[in-house]
Image (cartoon, helix red, strand yellow):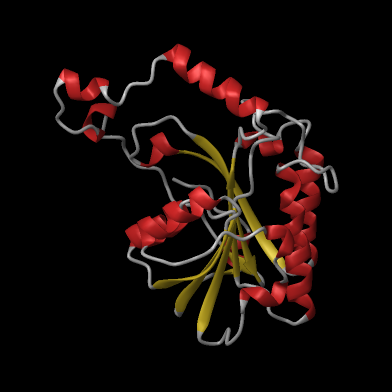
Amino acid sequence: MEQASIFDYLRKPYEINNKIRLIELFAGYGSQAMALRNLGADFEHYRVVEFDKYATDSYNAVHGTHFEPTDVNNVKGEDLGIEDKEHFTYLLTYSFPCTDISIAGRMAGMAEDSGTRSSLLWQVKRILEELKETDSLPQILLMENVTAIHSEKNRPHFAKWLDFLNNIGYVSYQADLNAADFGVAQHRERTFVLSILGDYNYKFPTTMDLNKCIEDYFEDLTEEQALQYVVKSEKALELLVELDEKDELY
């Protein structure tokens, strides 16, 4: 049985009763939009901020949209078009680049004003500050990132971020979740932070039994067909070195 929290009694659960206007910063190809779609949520692709042209093209191809590449550094709070909050729930996602905090990346950190890709998180801070000035903060914020976000090196900056959210009126809930605990045949641990504007309670979903294996995700292919999708290790290494030299390894 799950242990009860004092907040179960002091805070009321948050409910979404209006259509969601989804705003995705660092959108990639829109995996968070795909999650809403798979849940059957009533939402619209309201704003997409994605710097990479190829990721934006992929987003449009997957979701049938027509967004243009956008640099988060140039986005102002007013550009997000948050209005009529009585009739719409604004959900802003901000799963910023993990390049400089992941143990598989450069580990240059996420400190504010450090100039790393992971420090783009603080552009979100600027945008939220601008939205607060016009009383147009989104009702919900959602972030997903590698668990190294709260490693010893990054913990002070992560705590600074959570303090900022608290100071502008959000209550944040944090959890490390593994995809394998939610029906996906992959060990993939990620840190999630859900922030709700106002004094509300939230509980992350309970785990479920895993009844799939990797083989379930593959099409029935002949050996010859399967080999078309295999990249030999030496070729992959050569490509990674080339991308790193061009500073294109994200």
Whether 151 is drawn above or below 233: the answer is below
User: Which quadrant of the rendered structure holds the N terminus?
Assistant: top left
Percent across and percent down for residue 136 are: 68, 79
> Which one is in front, 201 or 74?
74
Residue 15 seen in the figure: no
Q: Quadrant of residue 73?
A: bottom right
> Which one is in front, 2 or 126?
126
Which residue is at 55% across, 60% downward?
202
Percent across and percent down for residue 220 are: 14, 30
> Which one is in front, 206 or 185?
185
Which residue is at 72% across, 63% downward?
74
Q: Quadrant of residue 186?
A: top left
Percent across and percent down for residue 239 are: 52, 23
Which residue is at 54% across, 39% downward?
190
Q: Is residue 105 left or right of residue 91?
A: right
Q: Is residue 160 left or right of residue 238?
A: right
Whether 45 is drawn above or below 51: the answer is below
> Which one is in front, 178 or 92?
92
* Tally of marks: 0
Q: Is residue 250 left or right of residue 16?
A: right
Whether 79 is drawn above or below 184: the answer is below
Which residue is at 30% across, 26% downward?
229
User: Which quadrant of the rendered structure holds the C terminus?
Assistant: top right
